[in-house]
Image: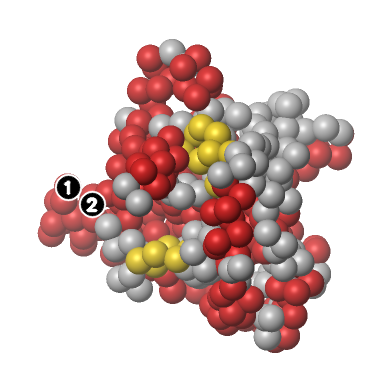
Amino acid sequence: MTVATQLNHKKELGSVPPPKLPSIVDIKNAIPAHCFTKDTFTSVRYLIQDLLLVAALYLILSPVEHYFGWLGLFAWYWAYGFVGFALFVVGHDAGHGSFSDYEWLNDICGHIAHAPLLTPYWPWQKSHRQHHQFTSHLEKDRGHPWVTEKDYNDRNWLQSGFAAFPLSGWLKWNPGYIVIGLHDGSHYWPFSRLFENNIDRLKCAFSVTCCLICGYTAYALLGYSVYNWFKYYYIPLSFQGLVLVMVTYLQHQDVDIEVYEPEEWQFVRGQTQTIDRKYGFGLDTLMHHITDGHVAHHLFFTKIPHYHLMDATEGIKKVLKPYENTPYGYKSESNYDFFFKFLHYNVKLDYLINKSKGVLQYRVGVEGERAARKNH
Ligand SMILES: [Zn+2]
Ligand SMILES: [Zn+2]
């Protein structure tokens, strides 16, 4: 009996125990050993590369605006969104410890990458770890919190409208997630619920101070003009926030994605509910393959630096091959229409319902599967 037939057979029983999945050690053994090597020089080179790209964008800003007007500025904002997110990914590796073997260097470079983006490095390192440790866990996987039918019905018109409103992507990250602290607590306020002890609170104060210094420096460089600060610093950063929200949303949200109640959740099972997406146009390379190498990143988030993700992905494809056509196979998609897909899914994927005991899926996915079974 293949894994797929076993699953279909068990589905009729209502409860679907997962098939025996490879252990994290099995998966690790399928990945070439060099993928687990952190090369400090390469990591620093990428940090410098991304800082130079941001600097280059500011160098061309004035001619772009002069010759192409508001349209040029809008295109520049998008470019800043992707380049800013690339820099963010380098800081993200530092937060995971996959930047180098030296924690002090990771912390310095992480702050250099994240503070200009107004992201407090240590607080986000803490909240992001939770997402990795409990991927697809109904209660513990935060960031883009899972919405059940009950949550959906309990929302007021403002909450449900905001979730589906296309422009919300610009606000969800900053101020929504990191400043106001929707769902996880503020990353800017040392006494928010995100922090459990005084060391965390001190670290928050330090990281926030770095952000404030960067924000003030930008204000000074822009002639102490609040208008210029928003136009040339905060709004570009809101595009970086939008790219971040879009990328992280599409990595874990799809019609067929499964989400598990605590008793059904297991680490590898949860991690297989991640999708690699190709954005094309050179963007995957620019964004350090956090888009099309996300499955590999999820499984070994502290061990594989971004420049080895694609090699590691080949190994993962092989080890998950027997699970093809089951919910636990390797998932990838080309999404050159990524922005429209993101907007569409925000409306289409409304809430999760149970597909079997302890296993949830988006309503549209469950209903689609039931309809397909009826027609068979
Ligand atoms: Zn993720
Ligand atoms: Zn991560």
Q: What residue appears at the point 56 percent right and 44 percent down from the top-left corner? A: 12
Query: Which image quarter is the N terminus in?
Result: bottom right
Q: Is residue 274 among what the camera can see?
A: no
Image height check: is 273 above or below 167? Answer: below
For marks 1 and 2, give the CA distance. 5 Å
Image height check: is 188 above or below 277? Answer: above
Q: Which residue is mark 1?
A: 70
Q: Which mark is residue 34?
A: none
Q: What residue appears at the point 40 percent right and 47 percent down from the top-left corner? A: 373
Q: Position of residue 199 (x, y in %)?
A: 86, 39
Q: What residue appears at the point 64 percent right and 36 percent down from the top-left corner? A: 357
Give yes or no for contact between labels 1 and 2 (Cβ–Cβ under 8 Å): yes
Looking at the image, which residue sits at the far right? 198
User: Secondary structure beneath disc 2?
Assistant: helix
Q: Position of residue 80 (x, y in %)?
A: 37, 57
Amino acid carrying mark 2 in the image: Leu
Ligand 1 lies under 8 Å from the Cβ of mark 2: no
Category of crowding for the residue at label 2, using alpha-carbon neighbours closer than 10 angstroms: few (below 14), some (14–19), many (at least 20): many
Q: Based on the displayed image, in which of its 4 quarters is residue 59 positioned?
A: bottom left
Question: Foreground residue, 210 or 117?
Answer: 117
